[in-house]
Amino acid sequence: RRPVCPAMTAPPRQPTPTPPVDQRAVEGTIVSSYLDTLYKLARGSATEQAEILARLEAEQAAAATPSRNLHYGLALSTPGHNGFDPVGAQRLLREVLANPETLLPAERAIAYLQLSLIDRYQALQAEIKRNQAETDRGERDRIAQLNRRLAAENEENTRLKRQLEEAQAKLDAISRIEQTMKNRTSQPEGRNP
């Protein structure tokens, strides 16, 4: 009989099972990276902001995955930097939310919340433009009304000035007539030249 090596007779080793993935921890890490980027965009120097946007844009252009589209869309939707683009952000966020199954639950939540904020921002901007247009139109109407009133008052002033001049001319004529009559009455009657 041949000696048997115990390693050869032992049952095969079972691979150690991989520990389960903590989905919440993964989502927390991803959302934390998004929020860190947004914070740096809001608070960073212009150079830092430009570098972050350029990096995110390059990553998104290289492989437009839902997560990269979301990350870039979140960056575009963050005010306070030169790359702020609410229209582009809306487009990207709507695109990723069109297929919500491609995102983690936390990503869906942050995308939905940010899209809601951008939609509200856009609605407020549109309302501001409407109000400004109405204000401008109202101001133009008020100015036109004031100009018409001023023109009417100028016409009235011209008419009154003309009447005053006519009345003054009449008074002057009456004054001359009175002076002539006074001169006639002050001459002695007996004297004939």
Image (cartoon, rainbow, N blue to C red):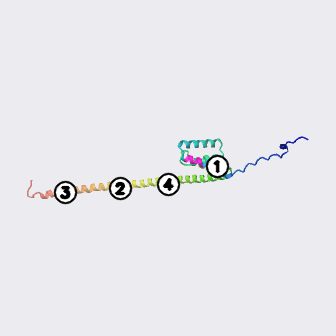
Precedes in sequence: disc 3 or disc 4: 4
Q: Mark 1 to mark 4: distance in Å? A: 43 Å
Residue at screen point 61% across, 41% down: 58
The amino acid sitting under disc 1 is Thr
- Amino acid at the residue labelled 2: Glu
Tag 3: residue type? Ile
How far apart marks 2 and 4 lie (CA) works out to 32 Å
Residue 56 drawn at (x, y percent): 61, 43
User: What is the crowding at mark 1: few (fewer than 14 residues within 10 Å), some, or many (at least 20)?
Assistant: few
Question: Badge 3, how many Cα within 10 Å: few under 14, some, many 20+?
Answer: few
Residue marked by disc 2: 153
Would you name the residue on which mark 3 appears? 177
Q: Residues within 10 Å of mark 4 (few under 14, many from 20)?
A: few
| Left or right, 53 with reference to 19 | left
Quadrant in which the N terminus is drawn = top right
Q: Which residues are magenta?
A: 35-42
Q: Nearer the viewer, residue 37 or 2?
A: 2
Residue identified by numbered label 1: 29
Q: Where in the figure is residue 8, as x and y percent of width and height?
A: 84, 43
Identified at 38% across, 56% down, the residue is 149
Inter-mark Cα distance, 3 to 1: 108 Å
